[in-house]
Amino acid sequence: MCGIAGTFAPGPAVPDLAHVAERMAGCLAHRGPDDAGVWVDPEAGVALGHRRLAVIDTSAEGHQPMRSAGGRYVVVLNGEIYNFRDLAAELEAGGMRFRGHSDTEVLLAGVERWGLEDGLRRMVGMFAFALWDREERTLHLCRDRMGEKPLYYAAVDGAWVFGSELRALRAYPGFVGTVDRDVLPLLLRHGYIPAPHTIYAGVRKVRPGHVVTVRAGGEPAERPYWTVLDAVERGLADPLPSGDGAAARDALADALSRAVRQQMIADVPLGAFLSGGIDSSLVVALMQAESARPVRTFTIGFREAAFDEASHARAVAAHLGTDHTEHVLTGQDALDLVPRLPELYDEPFADSSQLPTHLIAAVTRRSVTVALSGDGGDELFGGYDRYAWGMRLRRLRAGLGPLRHPAAAVARLAAGLPGRAGDRGRRLAGMLAAPDDAHLYREIVSLWRDPERAVRDAREPATPLGSTPPALAGRPLLDRMMYWDMVTYLPDDILAKVDRAAMAVSLETRAPFLDHRLVELAWRIPPGLRRRNGTGKWVLRRLLDRFVPRALVQRPKMGFAVPVDRWLRGPLEDWASALLVPERIADQGFFRADRVADVWSVHRRGARDWGYLLWPVLMFQAWVEAR
């Protein structure tokens, strides 16, 4: 895992390109504390900067920026190519010889042999890299299929600049960073800013599974080399047998075992997060099956019983025989982190589980450099509770028929009731009135239902949540909800959260469920094997039965929540009040001060639990104050 940054300035010469790239990459030292490097072609106006977290081939042979053996390409890579040994063997069979054993060298050799797009399709991994083609004088910005690793780019005074985080772009001379107020409704609705948008006007995220190509004198051209929708179409066209799920379970066991085995390759200490839930327990069980010694596992516990999963993780660890570390935290540990969130996340981000995610990363980094996780299991196998809610609401809407809109009106009246009843009435009204399933699901996952009312002079951009792809028309709602999450919530919330939380402490995280071969397999599994009799992740549970007694993991899903509602009426009240001063909000000109003040007042006096509405506003306000 690393940090990358650089520039392609084909116009007038940029003074001291090497220093510019060094300064940009230096902002990412937390992502790569082990080594630093810069490569410059002054004539072409190209500078590539790199900060290295040495994980595979920790010797000098893994130093970046790295040139290909033939000299045509130069690359800076953030991430890992998990199947690099298989690719290296294929390349060696064709006469290639390698000077080291890094995956970066294999990437370059593969691009020289097969070309960029064919090379990308052969790679299994999580990555974001910038590739300079010295022959074509072209810069390629490439991102992994599921969006595990971030990559931003923008035009600044005739130059193209890029980086793993926005802070690297801000370090480029002349970068202005004007807030794009149109994305603020997206932040309020989702708690994150979906790709390709960013908090800054004119700055974009490379989308998962895409390549952005920049040539002198032209605009960037973005094209996909793989999409979730492609995986969906192929999977639905070739389904596995349903029945008792034996074929799906066996295929899943093979694919996940292969992903775990390849992701355990590292030249540094490696472990895993273990919550005691289905996904992390299965990953750890397969790791232990591949390892001759106890796997290092890590969990955090909280003294507040409602948020503590440590006992469940402890039981699974004991059964599997892992070398388990448990660290008990207090609410104060999380509270102390709140002022640092703008620095850690670099862009407004409002999933409050960002707090415990960073804390478990910090605990884990004390012992290992790489940690595997169970991220992706819920999206791939129908694990979220909201999938059940969506299907129940769809049946309710169908049952009401022409009475749906009168029922929505009644629910709006219920919205006037105090406490949770009022909240539920307000949300139910929006769900009943939604024109179709796509908008129904958007209502289910929305924080603010009407975010434009809270933002001044903004028009909310469209996202995939507003429409159904033709390939999924007529498919069960479960399929569509999972697809929408895979292209929005997973890359832009879950994976962004984990990347920033872990890289802040120089910890590399890996997610076996996100191996694209496993993603493609998951779409071949019939919906009735993903959710059965109201139980999500049914086929995963049956696979886990081979390793862990069912009683150890059969419990309600807890998530990684923190009590934001209570904190905002208690230890965080002064912090929030200072950020939500109406005069300050009015002067900044982004939010409607009266709307925010109403929400804050209602929450403070306990009439509603509106912490979920306030958190994205607070994260933006804290970010504005810190920049």
Image (cartoon, rainbow, N blue to C red):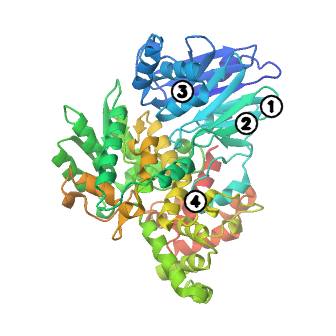
Disc 4 or 2, which lies upstream in sequence?
4
The amino acid marked with disc number 3 is: Leu
- Per the image, label 3 sits on a secondary structure element best described as strand
C-beta proximity under 8 Å, tags 4 and 2: no
Residue 569 vs residue 420, the one in the foreground = 420
- Whether pointer 4 and pointer 3 mark residues with C-beta atoms closer than 8 Å, the reply is no
Closer mark to the observer between disc 4 and disc 2: 2
> Which residue matches tag 1?
218
- Alpha carbons under labels 2 and 3: distance apart: 20 Å
| N-term-proximal mark, 4 vs 1 | 4
Pointer 2 or 3: first along the chain? 3
Q: With 433 as the anchor, is 285 left or right in this view?
A: left
Residue kind at label 2, given as amino acid type? Ala
Q: Is residue 283 above or below residue 63?
A: below
Q: Is residue 619 above or below residue 417?
A: above
Classify residue 452 as left or right of residue 618.
right
- Mark 3–mark 1 contact, CB under 8 Å? no
Q: CA distance from mark 4 to mark 1?
A: 34 Å
Residue at image coords 54%, 60%: 615
Label pair 2/3, CB-CB below 8 angstroms = no
- Residue ID for mark 3: 77
| Residue for badge 2 | 221
Label 2 crowd bin: few (<14), some (14–19), many (20+), radius 10 Å: few
* Badge 3 density bin: few <14, some 14–19, many ≥20, Cα 10 Å: many
Residue contact between numbered discs 4 and 1, judged by CB atoms under 8 Å: no
Q: CA distance from mark 4 to mark 2?
A: 28 Å
Eye-nearest disc, 4 or 1: 1
Q: Earlier in the sequence, mark 4 or mark 3?
A: 3
For label 1, the SS is loop
Instruction: Estimate the x, y position of residue 52 in percent, counting from the top left.
Output: 49, 24
> What amino acid type should be assigned to the residue bearing mark 4?
His
- Please name the residue that numbered disc 4 is placed on: 190
